Amino acid sequence: WVSIATPALAQREDPLLTMPDGQAIINISATERLEVEQDLLVATLAVQIVDRDPRAVQNQINQTMSKALSRAQKVSSVKSSTGAYQVYEYTEPRTKERKWRGQQSLTLKSKAADDLLGLAGDLQDLGLNMNGLTYMLAPETAARIQDQLMEAALAQLQSRAERAAKALGKSKAELREINVQGQTPQPYAMPMA
């Protein structure tokens, strides 16, 4: 009699080899979906300046962004953050004149759409351009919904396992391994005698 254990076997026993008589293993799955209204408005604005002097470009960007941030901070329901800042030289295609172009972005986020839209209008009056406006699901809302969906899927798994056990003539079912959010291993139920 020779016994050889591979690394895979050494790390995890095969449930079929250790399962008591009269029990069965079945694989089941459950998926829950929910349509959710997106609750966070996100606007991306940018200031863009072109000039022959790179210092003038930087100064104008800095002054405009300073005013924009000052206004944004006055609206407590809107969260603001600056983004990429870049200044680079380029050649004007028609005139072959060398100029400097600079830009910096500003992102606004809020669940209070009217407050954000009003602020975005004020910032456009300062010279910022609207680059994007979209709704998305707030991270805290997404986490709450994911928890609700997980709980519903687990209840569905338990119900399916119990139905399967009954169909197999078993008195109960036990969930042994559960996969949440696409992680391995797959869920399966073990109907008990």
Image (spheres, helix red, strand yellow):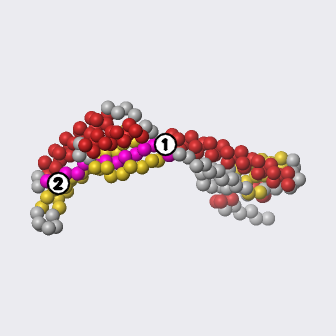
- Between residues 97 and 157, which one lies in front from this camera angle? 97
Question: Label 1: few (<14), some or many (≥20) within 10 Å?
Answer: some
**Kind of residue at badge 2:** Val
User: At 40% across and 38% down in the image, what residue appears?
Assistant: 114
In the shown orientation, is residue 175 left or right of residue 192?
left
Please tell me whether residue 36 is drawn above or below residue 96 in the rendered image: above
* Along the line of sight, the residue nearer the viewer: 144 or 13: 144
Viewer-closest of 157 and 68:
68
Residue 99 at x, y = what percent? 14, 58
Q: Which residue shows up at 70% across the image and 50% down it?
A: 177
* Tag 1: amino acid: Asp
User: From this viewpoint, is residue 167 visible?
Assistant: yes
11 is higher (above) or lower (below) than 94: above
Q: How many angstroms separate mark 1 from mark 2 (CA)?
A: 37 Å
What residue range appears in magenta?
38-51
Quarter-of-image position of residue 74: top left
Q: Residue at x 74, y 57 (%)?
A: 27
Q: Position of residue 37 (x, y in %)?
A: 53, 45
Badge 2: residue crowd in 10 Å (few <14, some 14–19, many ≥20)? some
Residue 66 position within the rendered picture, expressed as x and y whole percent measured from the top left: 23, 39
Image height check: is 4 above or below 103? below
- Residue 11 can be seen in this image: no
Residue 6 drawn above or below residue 153: below
Residue 111 numbered tag: none
Q: Is residue 90 magenta?
A: no
| Label 2 secondary element | strand
Instruction: Determine whether, in the image, residue 87 is placed left or right of residue 131.
Output: left
User: Residue tagged by mark 1?
Assistant: 39
For the N terminus, which image quadrant? bottom right
> Taken as a whole, is the magenta stretch helix, strand or loop?
strand
Residue 133 placed where, x, y %? Answer: 38, 49
Q: Which mark is residue 50?
A: 2
